[in-house]
Amino acid sequence: MVETSSKDPAYNGGLRTVGQVTAVDNTVGSLSEEQVSLIIGSLLGDGAMRCKANALIEFNHSAEQRTYVDWKFQQLQTLVSTPPKLRNGNGGRMAYRFTTRSLPELTPYYKAWYGQGRKVVPQLILTPLAMAVWFMDDGCKSHRAIYLNTQQFDLESQLRLLNLLQEQWGIRASLNRDKSYCRIRIAVESVGRFKSIVGPYVLSELEYKFPT
């Protein structure tokens, strides 16, 4: 198992081509490594993209997660024109959201994640920050295990994520059926390792997602 970080030669933050697969690398425009990791973690979670001439990313969470959304905005504010705002969501839910500007730096991400006509997981490198954002977006606990709610992705994407967790970080995980969909379950024996990797990046308001 090889651990990768922003200090390792193997680490890349934005987009590169490996064979016929798009992977992550830090050479896309003016995005910082931290911004790239936050974008990737959000796309693994609740982030959504749209594209006309260039792409934008929408960050949409419940109003109860205002602190978390404000933190994302602070990290990405060089890409954003308008700060987060409250909006009425589905079913009377109050949402707190913002979008980036449409930028050429973001378009390669749209092509990698949405190029097949639906949102899929491309080949990528999971940095600790990207995994932390993914966990803060879509993680939850059940007894001593951690679940990542990946039901939005197809089977191929979910199997890719299992391989990435194992190959890049030595984290054992499997698919757990949730009604008619599958989600990722991090094995109990890997929870401590996962927490040690992402813990330094998880906001205190969201630490309740970790098993005790």
Image: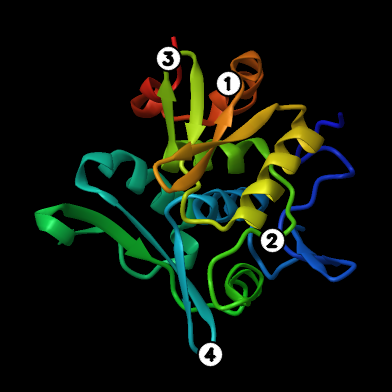
Mark closer to the chain start, 3 or 2? 2
Q: Earlier in the sequence, mark 1 or mark 4?
A: 4
Distance Cα–Cα, label 3 vs label 4 = 46 Å
- Could you say which disc has been placed on residue 53 in the image? 4
Identified by mark 4, the residue type is Ala
**Upstream in the sequence, badge 4 or badge 2?**
4
- Residue 93: where, in percent of width, then height? 14, 52
Under circle 1, the secondary element is helix
Mark 2 — residue?
122
Label 3, label 2: how far apart the Cα atoms are = 31 Å
Residue 59 lies, in percent from the top left, at: 38, 58
Q: Secondary structure at mark 4?
A: loop
Q: Residue at x 79, y 52 (%)?
A: 12
In the rendered structure, the answer to whether residue 211 lies left or right of residue 123 reads: left
Residue type, mark 3 in image: His
Q: Is residue 135 above or below residue 49?
A: above
